[in-house]
């Protein structure tokens, strides 16, 4: 997957990071081209091997296995899974989603539902102007042609969710996959408690204590570690 | 191999001959050196970069020879790669998450990705999966075995909880405890409270070992985890016993120390009757003492 730099998205991405009285919001919109790079080939082989293994272990189950991408014995469905996993890997460089199962994704048949959901969420957070003022959907449509897209989202269980690890109270994510253009638009937003530890993408306030001793010791902690501290369970 | 004393050379050759690593005590024995001197020699060898210390998944310390090819590989690394390698090495067999690697080394994401690829291709490090956070990218040195925390110990096979395995074991343990908890002849009787013949964790451990239900080595801690599981499921209970067969059985238990034993709990769901389940509604003690009356809020 190749990350595409699209200047029109920069304004939107800056606008998607803000604070509300209840939470801190971090959102981003990223565009990837489905060009297969070296590491991707390894991922594709890994997925194909896993599929073949599953097929040999329980053939009857696999023949009827229907996933959100369509029947799994069709190579195009497996290709879609591959593209989504590769996008997740590219968007979260500290994580590896290669073993994610197809059932952890859902397909959203209605584009308007998805847009409504996003609009409502942003409006309720007081930032509806991202939709109306910055023309969120117009900009994304120019990049990915929303009407031609299949929309998916990733629904992991608690262990595999990078958002939960950072203490997110809520989050959503959508993959807009345009097969013809061979592009994926990945749109994710999460809301974090005001008391959560510093996030990677967060700007360090210029006025915070720049005591050099404490600054570099800030190790990435998961929300669980932050809350429980040194308590031995 | 210049600059080594005769003893150092002897110790180095011994360690070199043991690819799985050797412990301090065996070095002392086989090289016929008193234990105090072994420490000094080991320090000198490791300062010269010839041996390294590792702790395996049980926390035992072993010493391994650093092979000549490894040494060359490490010396050939550029500054960034070496920093990444040393940080990963310091994490031992717990491994380190890439995000923590970033904070510790203060290197940029692209530099780290390149370093990791480089080190992986040289077979100096490897990526592992942790059962606690299966999507995190964690790296450790190539030769090390992941600790039990990361691999899940005996309960996990290939990153997945082996529920069948756990269930088989807990069923067997429950049966064993049940058989020692109630009198065999009459299903409705129980032992008197003073009876001392309930089973201890040590006895259960021995039972499991002898029954050969599994080839996996289970320690007393593992057995205790399974016992906790049964307690939380409400199938057995824990009691203190300071006398009786359990305490007298094995000499490693202090006779003064009260011992923990386990007794099965009978499922009384079918056996409760409506008279005992309904609260009485009027506290008899309140007739004796007004301060005991149950008024709303007091």
Image (cartoon, coloured by chain):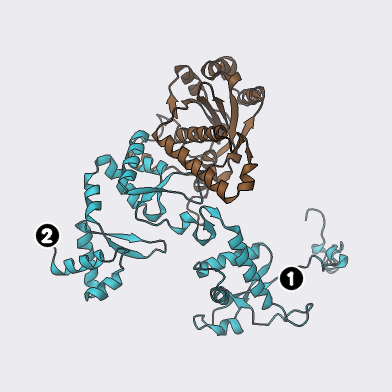
Chain colours: A brown, B cyan
Of the numbered discs 1 and 2, the one sitting upstream in the chain is 2
Q: Quadrant of the C terminus of chain B?
A: bottom right
- Nearer to me, A212 or B145: B145
Coordinates of residue B62 in the picture (x, y in percent) = 32, 64
Q: Position of residue A29 (x, y in %)?
A: 51, 25
Disc 2 crowd, CA 10 A, few/some/many (<14, 14-19, 20+): few
Identify the image quadrant of the N terminus of chain B. Answer: bottom left
Residue A118 visible from this viewpoint: yes
Q: Position of residue B273 (x, y in %)?
A: 86, 67
Which image quarter: residue A200? top left
Numbered circle sitting on residue B266: 1
Question: Which residue corresponds to the image point at 27% horizontal and 44% vertical from the top-left?
Answer: B82
Residue shown at 82% from the left, 59% from the top: B294
* Tag 2 residue: B2
Above or below, comparing residue B68 to residue A35 in the picture: below
Q: How many marks?
A: 2
Residue occupying image coordinates x 61% and y 44% = A62
């Amino acid at each position: 997957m190749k990350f595409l730099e699209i200047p029109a998205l920069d304004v939107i991405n800056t606008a998607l990071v803000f604070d509300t009285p209840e939470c801190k919001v971090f959102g981003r919109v990223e565009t990837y081209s489905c060009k297969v790079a070296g590491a991707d080939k390894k991922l594709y082989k890994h997925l194909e091997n896993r599929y073949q293994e599953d097929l040999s272990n329980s053939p009857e189950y696999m023949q009827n296995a229907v996933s959100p991408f369509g029947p799994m014995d069709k190579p195009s469905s497996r290709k879609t899974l591959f593209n989504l996993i590769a996008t997740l890997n590219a968007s979260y460089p500290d994580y590896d989603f290669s073993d994610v199962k197809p059932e952890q994704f859902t397909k959203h048949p209605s584009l308007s539902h998805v847009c409504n959901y996003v609009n409502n969420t942003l409006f309720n957070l007081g930032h509806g102007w991202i939709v109306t003022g910055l023309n969120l959907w117009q900009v994304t449509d120019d990049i990915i042609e929303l009407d031609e897209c299949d929309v998916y989202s990733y629904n992991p269980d608690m262990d595999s969710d990078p958002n939960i690890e950072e203490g997110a109270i809520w989050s959503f994510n959508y993959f807009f996959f345009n097969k013809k253009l061979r592009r994926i638009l990945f749109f994710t937003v999460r809301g974090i408690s005001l008391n959560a530890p510093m996030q990677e993408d967060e700007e360090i306030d210029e006025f915070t204590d720049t005591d050099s001793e404490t600054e570099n010791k800030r190790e990435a902690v998961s929300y669980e570690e932050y809350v429980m501290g040194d308590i031995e369970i | 191999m210049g600059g080594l004393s005769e003893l150092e050379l002897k110790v180095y050759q011994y360690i070199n001959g043991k690819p799985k690593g050797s412990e301090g005590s065996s070095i002392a024995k086989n090289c016929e050196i008193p234990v105090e001197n072994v420490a000094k020699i080991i320090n000198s060898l490791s300062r010269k970069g010839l041996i390294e210390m590792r702790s395996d998944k049980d926390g035992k310390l072993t010493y391994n020879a650093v092979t000549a090819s490894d040494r060359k590989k490490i010396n050939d690394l550029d500054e960034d790669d070496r920093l990444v390698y040393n940080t990963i090495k310091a994490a031992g067999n717990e491994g380190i998450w890439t995000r923590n690697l970033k904070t510790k080394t203060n290197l940029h994401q692209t530099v780290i990705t390149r370093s990791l690829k480089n080190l992986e291709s040289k077979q100096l490090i490897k990526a592992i999966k942790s059962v606690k956070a299966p999507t995190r990218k964690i790296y450790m040195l190539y030769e090390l075995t992941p600790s039990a925390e990361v691999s899940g110990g005996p309960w996990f096979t290939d990153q997945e909880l082996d529920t069948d395995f756990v269930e088989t074991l807990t069923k067997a343990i429950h049966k064993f405890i049940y058989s020692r908890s109630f009198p065999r002849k009459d299903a409705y009787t129980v032992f008197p409270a003073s009876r001392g013949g309930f089973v201890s964790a040590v006895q259960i451990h021995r039972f499991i070992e002898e029954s050969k239900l599994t080839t996996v080595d289970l320690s007393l801690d593992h057995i205790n985890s399974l016992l906790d599981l049964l307690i939380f499921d409400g199938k057995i209970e824990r009691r203190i016993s300071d006398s009786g067969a359990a305490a007298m059985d094995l000499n490693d238990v202090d006779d003064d120390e009260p011992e923990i034993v386990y007794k099965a709990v009978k499922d009384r769901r079918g056996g409760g009757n409506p008279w005992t389940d309904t609260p009485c509604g009027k506290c008899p003690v309140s007739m004796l003492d007004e301060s005991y009356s149950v008024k709303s809020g007091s």
